[in-house]
Structures are given as structure tokens and as C-alpha cells.
Image: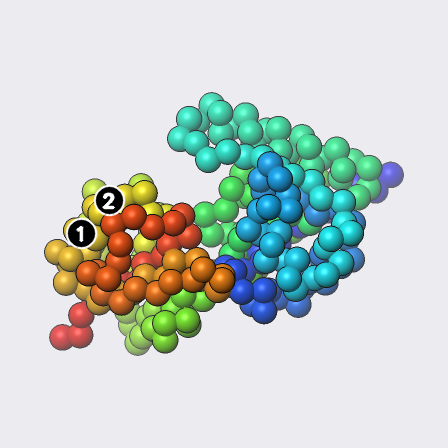
Amino acid sequence: MKTGILYGVGVGPGDPELMTLKAVRLIRENEVIAVPGSDARETVAYRIAAQAVSELADKELVPVDMPMTHDRQKMESSHDQAAELLEGYLAQGKNVVFLTLGDPTIYSTYLYVQKRVAAHGFQTELVSGITSFCAAAARTGTSLVEWNEQLHVLPAVHKLGNGFDLPGNYVLMKSGKKMDQVKEMLRKSGREVVMVENCGMENEKIYHGVDEIPDSSGYYSLIIAKEGKK
């Protein structure tokens, strides 16, 4: 019996109109849809996709609960369990479409699961989605790089100690929990700063300059910090 294919499908950053035609097609053509979270219909990825694909409401939804933790053992265990769960469907010959925010190649928990599934001999495929930082740049009318500029994409919560020691522009993701420290670094850097919170969603907020940024913000907060013009 032929086994199914696991598709890691990016649904974009929040605006359902930014979903790709391929993402929409795969959701429509396949019956098993996996979603990261304990309650599939309450996840951000599901809510985005449901606005673009009405058929999603009638699919078999598979919640894949992978709690965010820095405990390596717990993280590995949750990824193992997720892979085992999805492989059960693939072994039956069913394709699985796993919805993930933004693009599945950018800081996506899904990738840890795909590596396990692929290592067990199943076919997998990644489907690109619009990244949060590209969407945020477009939303604010900001260029990420021009001419020969460099772009550095960092998970700010893990990289605070490094400062801005490289030339070029920075994208800081996952900054919410340590925003006060991030703001202090940005202020010292003298960079031009814009932050978008919940890009493309109903509760989207845009902040221009470090002083506008609140000391605490949501998980989906993204900062673009550009070198000042000389």
C-alpha cells in the first residue's frame, strides 16, 4: 500500500489574502489537516486558513500539541509524539497537510516533526508561505535591504547578548517577553525602528520608533531595525 505525503504548508503571517494558491489547493484536495495546538479550531493558523478556504470546516482536523518549552527533553518528546501521530495517517495512505504560520522554513516547530517523519521513510514536502518580516516590511512601506546591504534575521529572545555588531539591517523576531531589554539595545544602536504586532490580523498594531514601542507586547511582534542613513 502506498503511503501518504506530509505537506508542511505555510499560511502566511495573518492576512488570509496572503495565502498562496498552492496552500489553498492542498487544503481543498486533502482530507486530513494537522494544526499546531491542543484545540485545532482555536489556533491562529486554522483561523487564518479558514477565512480563505471555507471547505476547511469539513476536514478531519488533527490537533498537534507541542508546548513551547526550553526543556530539551520535553521538547524532544513532544516532537516524537507528533511525528508518531502523523505517521499513523500516512501509513494508511492518507496525505496530511500541516498548517504553519508564515513560512515553514523560518523558525517553525513543524520542521522538527518533518525531520523525524522523513527519517522514518515517509515522503514530505514543504510549501512556502509569505514570511512575517516580508509582510511587515510591506505593511509599513519599509525596504528590508537595498543595493549591497545585509539582512540579519534573529530570534531576539535568544540573542540579546550579541548587540548589533554586524553591518546591515536587522529583523528581530520573538521579542515580546524581553521587550524592555530589546528597546534599550535599539535605543543605543541609533537605528531606525518600526515594529508590527500581529501583522495582517484584526488586532494589528504598528509602532514607529523605539519610544512608541510598549515595554510588553504579544508573541507575534516583529521589529525591523535599519542602519541610519549616512
Residue extending farthest to the top is 73
Q: Are marks 2 and 1 in contact (CB under 8 Å)?
A: yes
Give residue 58's position: percent from left, percent from top. 78, 52
Label 1, secondary structure: give it: helix
Residue bearing mark 2: 160
User: How busy is the neighbourhood of tag 2: few (under 14 within 10 Å), some, or many (20 plus)?
Assistant: some
Displayed quadrant of residue 19? bottom right
| Three-letter code, disc 1 | Met
Q: Residue at x 43, y 62 (%)?
A: 204
User: How busy is the neighbourhood of tag 1: few (under 14 within 10 Å), some, or many (20 plus)?
Assistant: some
Q: Which mark is residue 185?
A: 1
Give residue 159's position: percent from left, percent from top. 28, 44
- The quadrant of the image that shows the C terminus is bottom left
Displayed quadrant of residue 171? bottom left
Visible residue check, residue 221: yes
Q: 6 or 17: which is nearer to us? A: 17
Q: Residue at x 42, y 26 (%)?
A: 71
- In the displayed structure, would residue 174 be above or below residue 71? below
Give residue 52's position: percent from left, percent from top. 66, 64
- In the displayed structure, would residue 36 be above or below residue 22? above
Q: Residue at x 38, y 69 (%)?
A: 137
Q: Which mark is residue 103?
A: none
| Three-letter code, disc 2 | Leu
